[in-house]
Amino acid sequence: MLNGAVIVESLRPGSVFDDSELTLRRLSRLEVPDSTPEQPSVWTVVEFSSQADPGELAGHFARTLTGPGWYVSFDTDSETFVVFPGKVFRYPKGDERARAEAETYALSAGVPKSQTDW
């Protein structure tokens, strides 16, 4: 089982996740004071769980995310996944060096420091 969150506005138009991939845990709308110029100031956040293969799900997100400054994160019991358009970071929970690599990439991809809260 894995758990994570995705911002709906980060997905390309036409993206499809069928009911066998994600189970909705929570849906919320948030005003985001630190959004970038490429991001809207209001986000729709879907918190999800899934029985899907985490590597396959990460690949699907990597293909469906759009634009700079967006990512999806999710965790299994033992691993953290941080997914950007075309790029996946997968590392054991607690691996600070690997987390720092993902954060460095996030910052270079336009994610504000305040949004690197996976």
Image: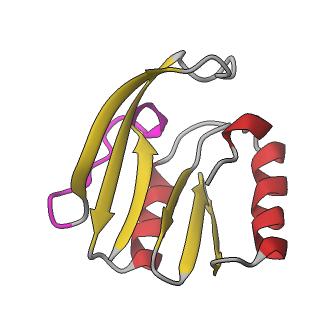
The picture quadrant where one finds residue 30 is top left
Q: Is residue 65 left or right of residue 37?
A: left
Q: Is residue 19 magenta?
A: yes
What is the x, y in percent for residue 3? 39, 64
Q: Is residue 100 left or right of residue 81?
A: right
Q: Looking at the image, how many numbered discs can be counted on the residues?
A: 0
* Color scheme of the displayed model: secondary structure
The structure residue drawn at horizontal position 48% and vertical position 63%, both measured from the top left corner, is: 74
Q: Does the rendering let one see residue 33? A: yes
What is the x, y in percent for residue 4? 42, 58
The structure residue drawn at horizontal position 60% and vertical position 61%, both measured from the top left corner, is: 82
Quarter of the C terminus within the rendering: bottom right
Residue 65, compared with residue 23, is above or below; it is: above
The picture quadrant where one finds residue 110 is top right
The structure residue drawn at horizontal position 28% and vertical position 37%, both measured from the top left corner, is: 27
Q: Is residue 101 left or right of residue 118?
A: right
Quarter of the N terminus within the rendering: bottom left
Q: Does the rendering let one see residue 110? A: no
Residue 102, compared with residue 8, is above or below; it is: below
What is the x, y in percent for residue 22? 25, 60
Task: Name the residue furthest left.
Answer: 19
Q: Is residue 65 left or right of residue 90?
A: left
What is the x, y in percent for residue 89? 66, 69
User: Which secondary structure class fits the magenta region best?
Assistant: loop
The picture quadrant where one finds residue 102 is bottom right
Residue 117, compared with residue 57, is above or below; it is: above
Q: Is residue 97 magenta?
A: no
From the viewer's side, name the closer residue of 42 and 117. Answer: 117
Q: Which residues are magenta?
A: 8-20
From the viewer's side, name the closer residue of 83 and 46. Answer: 46
